[in-house]
Structures are given as structure tokens and as C-alpha cells.
Image: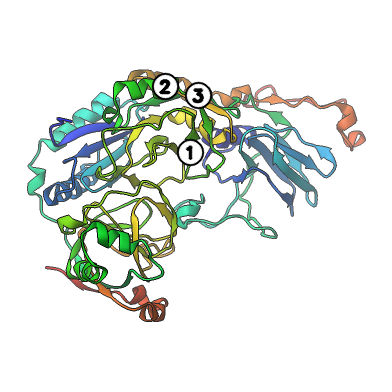
Amino acid sequence: MDTAWPAIRTAGFDGFVVSFGDALTEPANRAALAFRDALEASGLEGVEEISSSLVSAFLRFDPLSGLSHADMQAALQALLDKRDWYEAPLPRGRRLWRVPAVIGGDAAPQFSEAAAAAGYSEAEAVASIARQRVRVQTIGFSPGVPYLGQLSPEWDIPRRKKLNPQVPAGSLCVAIRQLIVFSVAMPTGWTHIGQTALNLFRPASDTPFLVRSGDEFQFRPVSPAELADLQDAPDGGATHEPLP
Amino acid sequence: MDRLAIIEGAALLGQPDTLAALEMAGRGGVFEATEDVRIALTGAPMRASLDDTKLVWGASHALPKGARLSIGAVTEGTYGYLHIGGGFDTPLELGARGAHLAAGIGTRIQGGQRLPVGPDVSGETGLRVAVDARFTGGTIHIVPSLQTEFFPEAEIERFQATAFRRDARGNRMGVPLLQDGAHFQSAAGLSVVSEVVVPGDIQITGDGTPFVLLAECQTTGGYPRIGSVLPTDLPRVAQAPPGTTLQFRFVSLDEAVAIETRERKRRMDLRKSITPLIRRPDTIPDLLSYNLISGVIAGDSPS
């Protein structure tokens, strides 16, 4: 692929994706978040949905309401041309979350595979995960689910060939230098390496999603008994503090 | 799963298609009205009866207070819909009444549960809608997706030439497609960056199995997608029962706009295709209570 970035492409019949790269980089992620915010602020007509993913902003519209695909593409290009999006700052109001997690153990038997793939003993792998501060690069897959990155290069392990039929709510999974914590039980192609007590999606709350893009995470390894005690604690024992 | 069924039900009851209906996967249940209500039955045909009288599917009916509505198994297709005059008035969650069970939004309706009903605006029943048959698979139109270009031309051709069978493991998230040939391969591999997913996307999972994503799909995903099903044809995929044949054909974005425009017009005109159910007198248990002579229809009633 010799696509030039940023690129505007259609997604399905009624969507556009504006992508800032084909691999996750820090500037591409910042650009996607900033472009998403700019799309929301632009008040473009005929738009039905706006969101962002790791390196892209998504827009859904009604191509039958008078605004053609070509019109929408031109409007997106005009907005793209307004600035260098890779230079955009991170969102404001970011927080650092300290999250207790059981890494490995009986509840996450795939951890040993992941540790081996990263070239670590299990103890080294736990220490590596706990040492690294990762950022919420997008909320996606399922409501409130943070994609956390970017881990050091040895964690660049591919998705699994065979789907995990189901991993539990709060489970910690890894692939391609990223971590995910699931909000509800889900099938996934990522490797299941641990468990948290986070409640990431609270549909009845004023703020249904616990964490936001730009927030940072640091995991604190705990024993299964400690995590069991935290199941009913506020935010599953996680604490947060403002980031500058 | 089948938005057309929602529109058909709204047309039958003469109400907005934004009101909530009950989706029934595979089979229905037994319902009792605590007030006189109107219902419509759309989507995959199911065996239905009102007390002991068989009910026509794809039609509206009066459900008097105390009567028992029994809805059994599908005879064709997968998802049947029960609509009610005024719509089901369940509490809003995140601004809607729909369920996304995988994401923890909304819940399944349980036996013994009471469902609130909104105010009904009309009283007309005994109508039938022209049903677009979509319950036996067929040819599905698709447009290119974000990763279509990662698939070699030969794989795209083979994809369009393959008669897939809908796997029994499908659910509201999506349906896997079975076929006897080699697994589908892309140059994207298993390490592409996760991108936005839209309902209708056909992702090729790690073992090469195509998977058509439906209403309850994830919002982002990293498996490469070979194409995306047009909204018009998505009910045909959702309704295909296990084992039915599905084939896919790429169309350009311009062709897609033409297809979607035609279908939107047809859906807007659905109300004009509503016709009275022809009732055989021997199936009307309370025949003598009808005023059989002086019935009139206002000539200016909306068609």
C-alpha cells in the first residue's frame, strides 16, 4: 500500500474514515482525536454520527439526503487542509488511573504464551506490564473499552488465529503493543493475560464511560484474593489523579 | 436486525417507525393484552394464533383485552417482530429502547414481564403489507471496505464466485459464512491497526472465515474487511436461516446510491401498498357481531 496520509476513505455505504496513518503512532493518534473534535465543532450538515478510533476519525451521514459522497469528501478535505493535525495537542482534562490487576494465574492461562512471545519469563512479563504507563488511545470495540498503548516493542504480538470465544468483563488482554480492558464479557482475538475489577461502562450514569481518550493507566499487580476484595470497591479499587 | 420489518410494522399500524417493537429470534411466546390493543406481525413468518384463530403474518390485527396471542416457531427466516399500536413504552437507556445485549445495553424480555404501551393514535386493523421476501438467502450487494485493496484480485473474484452457507453459530453480532474452498487470504495479516467497524462489514477472521457483522457488532476491529453489505441487503443476511446460500456481488458507490435510493422510495411508498386482509367468513368466530351491511370507508382516508 502506498497511500499518502492523511487519507479520506469510505467505510460502508454511508461512512467516511479520515485516517492519519496505517500504524499506531503517537502523532497519528493525537491527530485523530483532534480531528474528531474539530468535526464535532464544525457543525457539518447531514452528519449522523462522529467518532474516532486509534488513528482515524469516523463520520456517518445520509448520502441520499442531497449531500453526495463527493460533497462530503470535499468538506472533509477542506477541514483537513486547515492545519497540521499531527501537531495538535492532546485533549484537556486528562487523568492518570492506577488500576489493580491480577496478571497471569489460573484466570488468565494465556499469559504464559504472551510472556513467551515477548521473550520474558512470567515474572519479567508482569514487571514489564506494571512498569509501563500506557495512554487511552481510543475508546472502542464495545462501549467504554479503552485501547491502551503503546507498550514497548517486545509486546508486538499478533492477534490470535482462533478467537477466544469469551473473556470476562474486566479482563486484561494484549496484542500489537496494546492492552485492552473489556467492559463486558466478549469474544476477542487478543490474548487474555489478566483481570481487573474495573466497571468501565455504566449505562445509567451521567458519564457512562469511566475513562476517556487521553487518560493514562498504570497497572498495579495484586493477588487474586486482593482483587476479590476489590470487586465491590468504587471503580474496582482504581484511583485517579489529574495529569498536567 | 431487520430494519425493514420495523418499517413494515409502522406502515401497518400507521405510526412512526421510531416506536419500539419486540424482536423474536427463532420463536415467539405467549402474550396477553391487559387492554384492547392493535398489533402487527412482521419479519420472519412465525406460527401465530389469537386464542384459537390462526393469524396471518405480515398483517395487523386487533388484540382484545384478555385475549391470548401465541407466537411459535419461525416457518422461514430468523427474526420475527411483534409491533403494538403506540409502541412498547419501556424506559429509555442512552436515549433509546433497543437492546445491544453484548454491550450490556437493554435486556431480554422475560416470561411474566409486563410491557408498558404508549398511546395509540389509530384504530385500524386487518391490513396486510406487501412483504419483500428476504428469508431464504440470495445475492447480496456489497461495496468496497477499508481493507478491500489488501485482497488480491483473484481472491475478490473467488469471493464473488463462492456460494456461502450461513453458519448456525450466527447471532446478533454477526454470522459466519461456511464454504468448502481454501480460506480467504489478505496481505493485511493479523497486525493491522484496529479501525472503525460498521454493520454490514465482512471481516475475514484469523482462520480465513468470512463473518458478516450485524447490528450488535463491535465498534472497531482489526481483522481485514473484504467488503461491506449495503443497508438494503442487510436484512437478507440477518434473516437467512442456518444452511441457506448467500452470494456476494460488488457494486460501485454510484450503483449503491441508485439501489439505496430505489429502496428508500419503495419503503416510503409502503403505506400505499397496504391492503385489507381478505377474511373468510368461516374464520370469524364472532361473525354475527359484525355490522355486515352498512360498513363504509371514508373516501378521504389516507392511503
Dot 2 and dot 3 within a common chain: yes
- Of residues B241 and A53, the one nearer the viewer is B241
Answer yes or no: is residue B219 visible. Answer: yes
Q: Residue at x 62, y 55 (%)?
A: B109
Q: Residue A70 at what x, y percent from top left? A: 25, 24
- Helix or strand or loop: what does disc 2 sit on? helix
Residue pointed to by mark 3: B163
Residue pointed to by mark 2: B160
Q: Circle 2: is it few (<14), some (14-19), or many (20+) Cα within 10 Å?
A: some
Dot 1 and dot 3 within a common chain: yes
Q: Quadrant of residue B242?
A: top right
- Of residues B212 and B290, the one nearer the viewer is B212
Q: Judge from the rendering whether residue B220 lies leftward or rightward of residue B261; answer left or right.
A: left
Closer to the N terminus: mark 1 or mark 2? 2
Q: Residue at x 51, y 27 (%)?
A: B246
Q: Judge from the rendering whether residue B240 lies leftward or rightward of residue B274; answer left or right.
A: left
Q: Amino acid at mark 1?
A: Pro
Answer yes or no: is residue A47 visible. Answer: no
Give me the chain letter of mark 3: B
Q: Residue B298 at what x, y percent from top left? A: 71, 25
Callout 2 touching callout 3 (CB < 8 Å): no
Per the model, the C-alpha gap separating discs 1 and 3 is: 13 Å
Give me the chain letter of mark 2: B
Q: Amino acid at mark 2?
A: Gln
Which numbered marker is on residue B176?
1
